[in-house]
Amino acid sequence: MTTVSSGAGVVADAVIPAPVDLEPGEGVLDLTAVTIDAPDDVTARLAGELLAASGAAVGPRDGVPVVLTQDPAAGPAGSESPERYTLTVTADGATVAAPERAGLLHGVRTLRQLLNAGRGEAGGALEVGAVVVRDAPRYPWRGLSLDVVRHWFGPEDLRAVVDLVGSYKMNRLHLHLSDDQGWRLDIPSRPALTKLSSQGAVSGAPGGFLSTDEYRELQEYAAEREIVIVPEIDVPGHVNAATHAYGELMPSGEATEAYDGIEVGFSKLHFDLPATEPFLRDVFTDVARMTLGPWVHFGGDEVLMMEADEFGRFVVLCQELIAEAGKTPVAWQEAAGSVDDSVDDSVDDSVDDSVDDRADGEGPVLVRPGTLLQYWDTRPDPAPLVRAARAGAKFVLSPADRAYLDMKYTPEHPLGLHWAGFVELRDSYDWDPATVIDGLPESAVEGVSAAVWTETMLNRDDLFSMLLPRLAAVAETAWSRPEAKDWASFRDRVAIEAATWRREGSTYHPTPQIDW
Ligand code: TNX
């Protein structure tokens, strides 16, 4: 795609992620004053907020009409995505047509970017060139995974992250809510978790947690914006916050010390202890009950000190508990097991026959059909993942060398880690989710999630400087088809979008890969 500038200086193509189809027309719409007509009050309010943030005066009448209308025929020809939309701008007004509310919001988000592009740095004209945008996402899951344990980010920061995620048409915010350093969600049946384990973070930084009310309010805030919060309780490793609160989870019966370092892999649950199963049942039942969305993530990563058969029992049990509580399980890729697992027969018996695939003489497949696996580590053999896909697992892709936005941009970058290498903007842009896992059928790819671990990020500025501009690159990789992606065009569009970041005070990293 190319950047189109009209005589009025209006940039017609400033949309991130790149849409399926954008056709400039004749004329210019002045959005100085707008009147919004939407199917419901919440949608009208949100559309108004988005356009007002771009400088439009939003009023009940006399403005140019911005009409949001439900229309099953909207979107690109042939698209069946429930998120599809058509945005039509003429000299007289703007219309967003979409079969569902998500598409209506996406259309307004596109209009916001076109408006900001015309406006430029310091309050230029509030004009948008006439255009028709027909658009729909490539993948249904487009998200950000955020660690709120290593450093604590409270409700206000989380709402800012929800807004950011939504502005690039992402629809999932996965929160990593428990780890060695802290427990960040009140669990009514297990009050000691937040009472004893929420106040720490890395290197003595202050902790915190979401009360059940705050968790509900955050989910409602996200849901208004068509974003689903996916809670993660990480087991059976990364559990020092749990063993610090409940000593009964340790063979010694003694609670472990609080931990504020950044090592991984040293803590674990013990399947055979009498306290373990009731603990997991209480926690996952409460989390499922408090969660509005359909998914609960049970972690499963980096369990470095456990035999494969014990790990397999945890994977089977957690899926069972989450499914019994009415949710779909999500786990890190390790839950697929490994081909050389020496899983014994009793685990095998507890695995549903329909997913037990021993045809090739390997261990059982531990995941249920429909379980989502989040791929992050590009080093292990992909064979178990392909087997899990054959058994019905779906994949959310967060390849660390592309989508881990806690990796440093360059060796000199002050924040971040580098175990997966350095991830410059172009690295997080130039990849195709369909070809990330060797041998995985594309039908098993549910989508893409950027991920940010916060060992080195102390506050919102730190966090946003790692997210921006790379989150926009991952968002485009998740939304746009390969034929719509173009690095040169993306560079131009990021530079345009950055004027909005500056105006709104969002910190970003001015990578030399962009002509700012
Ligand atoms: C690996 S990625 C982890 C996290 C760390 C991260 C740092 C994953 C599933 N586990 O515990 O925070 O590396 O990049």
Image (cartoon, helix red, strand yellow):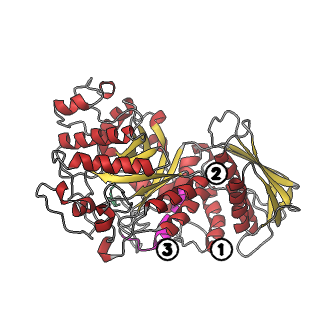
Q: What amino acid type should be assigned to the residue bearing mark 2?
A: Ala
Q: Which label sits in the foreground, 2 or 1? A: 1
Q: Is residue 84 left or right of residue 320?
A: right
Label 2 and label 1: CA atoms lie apart by 22 Å
- Residue occupying image coordinates x 35% and y 53%: 233
* Of pointers 3 and 1, the one earlier in the residue sequence: 3
Tag 2: Cα neighbours inside 10 Å, few (<14), some, or many (≥20)? Answer: many
In the rendered image, residue 467 lying in the magenta stretch gets the answer: yes
Image quarter for residue 262? bottom left
* Of pointers 2 and 1, the one earlier in the residue sequence: 2
Q: What amino acid type should be assigned to the residue bearing mark 1?
A: Arg
Q: Is residue 467 left or right of residue 60?
A: left
The residue under label 2 is 18
Q: What amino acid type should be assigned to the residue bearing mark 3?
A: Asp
The residue under label 3 is 461
| Quadrant housing the C terminus | bottom right
Mark 1 CB in 8 Å range of ligand 1?
no
- Residue occupying image coordinates x 45% and y 41%: 435
**Range shown magenta:** 456-473
* Of pointers 2 and 3, the one earlier in the residue sequence: 2
Q: Which numbered marker is on residue 503?
A: 1
In the rendered image, is residue 512 in sight?
yes
Given residues 338 and 61, the one toward you in this image is 61
- Residue occupying image coordinates x 37% and y 63%: 184
